[in-house]
Every structure is written in C-alpha cells, then in structure tokens.
Image (cartoon, rainbow, N blue to C red):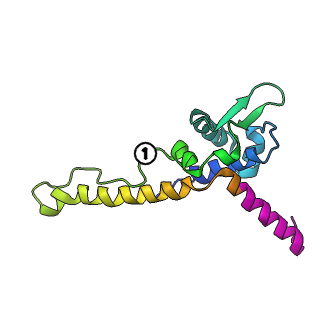
Amino acid sequence: MAFSSRFAVAVHILTLLGSSDGLPVSSERIAGSVNTNPAVVRRLLSLLSRAGLTRSKRGAGGGALLARPASEITLCEVYRAVEGGELFRLHPEEPNPSCPIGRHIQSALESATVAARDALESSLGERTVADIIGSIAEGMEWERSSGEVV
C-alpha cells in the first residue's frame, strides 16, 4: 500500500513560508529545504493557492507567500487542500450482493471509516502552521542551549 507524503511536504512548505518574515520564497529555495524537485513544490503550491493558503508574487524577487497568517491556517485545511479524496477506499468492485457479508460490508465499513476521518480532521483542525513553527523554534532553541550543532 502506498502512502502519500503530500501533506507532510505541504506543511513543510507552509512552515518555511511562515518563517520567511513576509518575504517571498522561490520554489527552488523551498525545494532545497524539502530536498525535492522544484516541480513537485510548484504542484503543491498550486493546490495550496487554490485552497487560499498561499499566494504568489511574480517578477524579480518573487515567490510564494502565505495568503493568511500562519496562526489562521489549520493543518486540517492543509490536509484537505493536498490530499483530496477519501482517507480510506472501500472495495473497488461492488461486493457480491448474494452474500450476507458482501451485501452489508460497504455500509459497515463506511460508518467506521467516516468516524476515523472525522477524528483525524478534528485533531488536525486543532493545530495550525504557527504551532509547527513554534515546535521547530523550541527544537532549535534546545539545540542551541545543549550545544548541538545547528
């Protein structure tokens, strides 16, 4: 089973933008931080822009910016912007309606998976990009105070 890393990369991008003191950040610089291709960053920035989370400044010195303060962007919004679709997929083919299990499995699974999705979205809705920036700042402060190389 393949899992997507779009959410993690999108949060990384938004965290970098939120830490840029309001200055635009190029997709090349973002890609260097994420350690990926700038085209991947541009695709995600497009999804984030469509969701109203980022905007771009064109021209020399241009790049991506947050569309709103980091404290107003929830991780749930990021998840919805880049992951799309359902968290769980049900049977790709209709189960056998002649089988008592097959006849009822979809509705039983849907109930359980909707509850799981709602719990995930609720948890992500309680955290913002600013919270991630704060956690990183705490980690960097710990490194400085403990003598770790930054």
Identity of the amino acid at label 1? Gly
Depth check, front residue: 33 or 81: 81
Residue range highlighted in magenta: 133-150
Up-down relation of residue 54 to residue 97 (above or below): above
Q: Where is residue 40 in the image (x, y as percent from the top left)?
A: 63, 42
- Name which residue lies at 57% across and 33% down: 50
Q: Position of residue 83 (x, y in %)?
A: 51, 47
Q: Where is residue 67 in the image (x, y as percent from the top left)?
A: 68, 36
Q: Residue at label 1?
A: 85
SS at badge 1: loop
Residue 136 on the magenta segment:
yes
Q: Judge from the rendering whether residue 132 lies leftward or rightward of residue 121; answer left or right.
A: right
Q: Judge from the rendering whether residue 76 lies leftward or rightward of residue 1; answer left or right.
A: right
Label 1 CA crowd tier, 10 Å (few <14, some 14–19, many 20+):
few
Q: Say how many tags the image has.
A: 1
Up-down relation of residue 56 to residue 81 (above or below): above
